[in-house]
């Protein structure tokens, strides 16, 4: 695996504590967003940041444990993979926990994701927003200034600012913008809120040698999403050229459903033109294009799968 010795660290950080202490007859990952009793919140949650800290909850029903995560096809499968990987490692180490073969998942559909989003506090977003910035918005304090996030503590938080008579909403998500969830968020912003432009500021992974994590930003105008090539205009081009040309790398992106797919064999078979991978960016771009709105991304390169570095997926939190 491209994460090599770090692989055991990553699942341990993500797996719910209820899975670490006893044997269950089965583990089922389901697409349900629930954070109140009888669901039990994960102790692995990092509450030292305002967004991307909520992790799947757990509920035990007659010795069967259900792991509940925000509905999304890729998200549910990814969580099941993490749990299976963790339990397989523990089994190999001689620990008596639930056999990894007893892990399953109930697939989430795009309509499941849409329903969850339509029930969320995103419906309270103020009217008249032209541009939405998604992702690590709490790191953009030079643009937002001091922030008290609106949204009444739901799964989304936002603040709205005016730039050149344009209303810009900076929106963070307390669960994870994983895979197709991100695309459905973009679709909802376009269809229900009239948003005309989405900018995504986050992290992604390089698949090329010679790129040191956390020293470069990434952008681009093309993503491979399944068997499709999604191409768009980069609305950030002028600004990058003017202010950040030396620290931004441009390249072709590829969407991956989950980082545990990223094996050495997978890396060797990647199309040669691919520079970056992550689960969200391409699906956001595709959703924006299908919705007739503009999209661009500017990400920190936080890991490099082509070579081992101190910064990797297990410690980028």
Image (spheres, grey):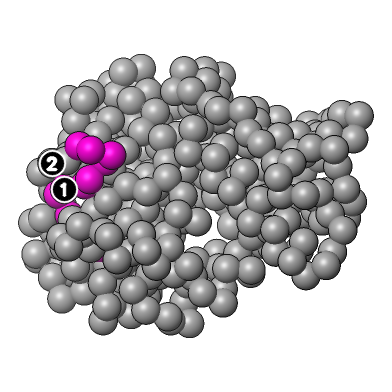
Report crowding for label 1: few under 14, some 14 to 19, many 20 or more residues within 10 A (C-alpha). many
Q: Is residue 248 left or right of residue 39?
A: left
Camera-side mark, 1 or 2 = 1
Q: Position of residue 55 (x, y in %)?
A: 65, 46
**Residue at mark 1:** 222
Nearer the observer, 18 or 135: 18
Q: Which mark is residue 210?
A: none
Q: Is residue 19 left or right of residue 270?
A: right
Q: Majority secondary structure of the magenta segment?
A: strand
**Residue at mark 2:** 232
Q: Please say whether residue 195 is one of the residues in the magenta stretch.
A: no
Q: Which residues are magenta?
A: 218-228
Q: CA distance from mark 1 to mark 2?
A: 6 Å
Asked if the residue under mark 2 is in contact with the one under mark 1, i.e. CB atoms within 8 Å, the reply is: yes
Q: Position of residue 117 (x, y in %)?
A: 50, 24
Q: Please say whether residue 221 is one of the residues in the magenta stretch.
A: yes
Q: Can you tell which quarter of the image residue 76 is in?
A: top right
44 is higher (above) or lower (below) than 179: below
Residue sitting at 39 percent across and 28 percent down? 184
Nearer the observer, 308 or 112: 308
Residue sitting at 56 percent across and 77 percent down? 5
123 is higher (above) or lower (below) than 310: above
Nearer the observer, 14 or 117: 14
Residue sitting at 45 percent across and 34 percent down? 181
Give the structural element (helix, strand or loop) at label 1: strand
Label located before the other in sequence (1 or 2): 1
Report crowding for label 2: few under 14, some 14 to 19, many 20 or more residues within 10 A (C-alpha). some
Q: Position of residue 69 (x, y in %)?
A: 63, 36
Residue sitting at 90 percent across and 35 percent down? 63
């Amino acid at each position: 695996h491209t994460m090599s010795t770090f692989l055991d660290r990553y699942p341990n950080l993500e797996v719910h504590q209820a899975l670490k202490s006893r044997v269950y007859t089965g583990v089922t990952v389901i697409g349900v967003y629930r954070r109140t009793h009888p669901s039990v919140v994960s102790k692995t949650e990092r509450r030292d940041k305002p967004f991307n800290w909520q992790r799947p909850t757990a509920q035990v029903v007659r010795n069967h444990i259900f792991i509940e995560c925000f509905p999304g096809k890729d998200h549910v499968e990814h969580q099941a993979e993490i749990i299976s990987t963790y339990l397989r490692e523990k089994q190999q180490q001689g620990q008596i926990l639930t056999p990894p073969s007893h892990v399953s998942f109930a697939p989430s559909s795009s309509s499941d994701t849409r329903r969850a989003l339509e029930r969320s506090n995103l419906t309270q977003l103020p009217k008249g927003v032209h541009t939405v910035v998604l992702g690590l918005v709490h790191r953009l304090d030079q643009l937002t200034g001091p922030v008290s996030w609106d949204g009444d503590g739901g799964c989304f938080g936002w603040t709205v600012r005016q730039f050149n008579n344009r209303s810009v909403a900076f929106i963070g998500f307390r669960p994870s913008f994983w895979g197709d969830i991100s695309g459905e968020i973009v679709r909802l912003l376009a269809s229900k809120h009239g948003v005309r432009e989405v900018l995504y500021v986050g992290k992604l992974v390089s698949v090329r040698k010679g790129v040191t994590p956390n020293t470069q930003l990434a952008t681009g105008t093309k993503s491979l999403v399944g068997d499709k090539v999604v191409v768009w205009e980069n609305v950030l081009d002028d600004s990058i050229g003017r202010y950040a040309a030396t620290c931004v790398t441009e390249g072709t992106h590829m969407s991956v459903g989950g980082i545990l797919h990223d094996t050495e064999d997978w890396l060797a078979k990647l199309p040669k033109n691919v520079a970056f991978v992550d689960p969200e960016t391409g699906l956001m771009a595709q959703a924006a294009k299908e919705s007739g709105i503009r999209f661009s991304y500017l990400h920190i390169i936080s890991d490099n799968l082509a070579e081992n570095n101190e910064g990797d997926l297990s410690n980028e939190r």
